[in-house]
Image (cartoon, grey):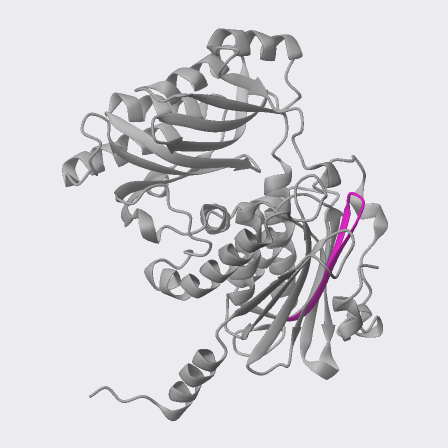
Amino acid sequence: MERYHPSEVYELFVRHMNTPRVVVDNGVCETATLVQVHSARKHGVLLEAVAALSDYGVCVRKGYISSDDGRWFMDVFHVTDAAGRKVADTDKLLARLESALSAAAAAADALPWAVGCDSPAKERLCLLELIGVDRPGLLSEVFAVLHDLRCGIVDAQAWTHGGRVAALVFVRDEDTGAPIHDVARIRRIESRLRHVLRGGARGARTVLVDAAAVGNLDRRLHQLLNEDGEADRRAAVEAPTTTTAVAVQEWGERGYSVVTVSCRDRPKLLFDVVCTLTDLDYVVYHGTFDTDGDHAQQEFYIRRLDGRPISSEAERQRVIQCLQAAIERRSSEQGVRLELRITDRRGLLAYVTRVFRENSLSVTHAEITTRGDMALNVFHVTDVAGRPADPKTIDEVIHGIGTDSLRVDEERWPRLCSTEGDAAGAGLFSLGSLVKKNLYKVGLIRSCS
């Protein structure tokens, strides 16, 4: 019989007795839906809650995190839909949160980035992880190679930032629709893609995964770019232009490191920050986040997993660099957002991205989704120099591919996050502002002010 240490038994007992409890309330606040999450504290549980909110598509307008520094925590989020209204279907949001929090532990056992599971299909798929130097037309070359190798693309996401590209591509056999098991064929796919990426042995990696266990793709893209050293490479560039202000200070008497972020608000900002802190192995004990128009301010009181605060200048700079890079990766979803909805067919992505390339358009971000026989794809495009694309060129591409299938998304960001502005000018929270403002009183839960 397997024996457990008493501390392990107690930990299991506490988790069992403190199954995550979620409350979704539309009656407390006039302008937002209130979401409260109570749970036993464990590493990553905050990320699980934030990921579930992000996947549901709501905007977090304000909130706070409170912990007793022991074994429990409470999160409070004020959220709206993309149009700035209260969430209409609170029962559906509640079910989504409860399902995500209860399933997260099992998913995390399968993959270290399996948070916010959203699998593309209930089958075994071949996952391609790609990382390399970005250049105009690269995605077109990748999709052309996969089509040539008879690989059908089921889902994919690609990010570009700092001169690098990271992509996750789920493929299956184009002829049979079955998973690709042949080892020789997999090695051939990897070899061809490495040649296209010009990234050496790390340029392409193939993993056979159970689609039901696939976790949050955004988190994995962050990890790929961090592992690639993109944040360090960015920091080495002399005086990079940024409107993202990040600072790390020490609160020695309480043993915390205090992370403050001031930047332009946008969708999934809170997720990107919490995801980065979690993957750097920091635990958030307390925090606040607030938005004012297009400006966001966040403050987190953190310690390492071993309970100690940040202990060196090098570690402090590493946290700052990784947070700035994570925030700006998604901020670089620049250019025109094109949405493609069309009946899926062989070679579709190779064709569409070739049209982009032939018209001197560069894809900065891509989200590829297949649902049944329909392809639902989103592309962010600029000209090859990274400047806004010529409207005439966009119009020609739309007419070339089909006006019934390809369109420009006029509302690229939710209304609450769309105003232009320089977020850095608003400054950072000062050390201890969270405590001075006494944000942990019950009054915050019952107030929108």
Can residue 259 be seen in the rendering of this structure? no
248 with respect to 347 (left or right): right
Image location (x, y in percent) of residue 119: 37, 46
Quarter in which the C terminus is drawn: bottom right
Rendered view: 37 above or below 273: below
Tell how many labels.
0
Residue 158 at x, y percent in the picture: 47, 35
Q: Which of the pair 75/420 is nearer the observer? A: 75
Q: Which quadrant would the N terminus be assigned to in this image?
A: bottom left
Q: Nearer the viewer, residue 320 or 328?
A: 328
Residue depicted at 72% across the width and 72% down the height: 250
Q: Is residue 249 above or below residue 346?
A: below
Instruction: State the residue in front, 18 or 178.
Output: 18
At which x and y percent is residue 170? 33, 38
Task: Pick out the residue farthest to the bottom.
Answer: 6
Q: Residue drawn 46% across and 79% down?
A: 15
Which quarter of the picture shows residue 317? bottom right
**Magenta residue check for 286:** yes
Dominant SS of magenta comes to: strand
Residue 390: quadrant of the picture: top right
Residue 420 in view, yes or no: yes
Judge left or right: residue 144 versus residue 98.
Answer: left
Q: Quadrant of residue 183?
A: top left
Q: Say whether residue 340 is magenta.
A: no
Query: In the image, which residues are magenta?
Result: 285-299
Describe residue 161's horizontal placement relative to residue 353 as left or right: right
Q: In the rendered image of this protein, does residue 385 appear above or below residue 25? A: above
Q: Position of residue 78 (x, y in %)?
A: 70, 57
Q: Is residue 77 left or right of residue 53?
A: right
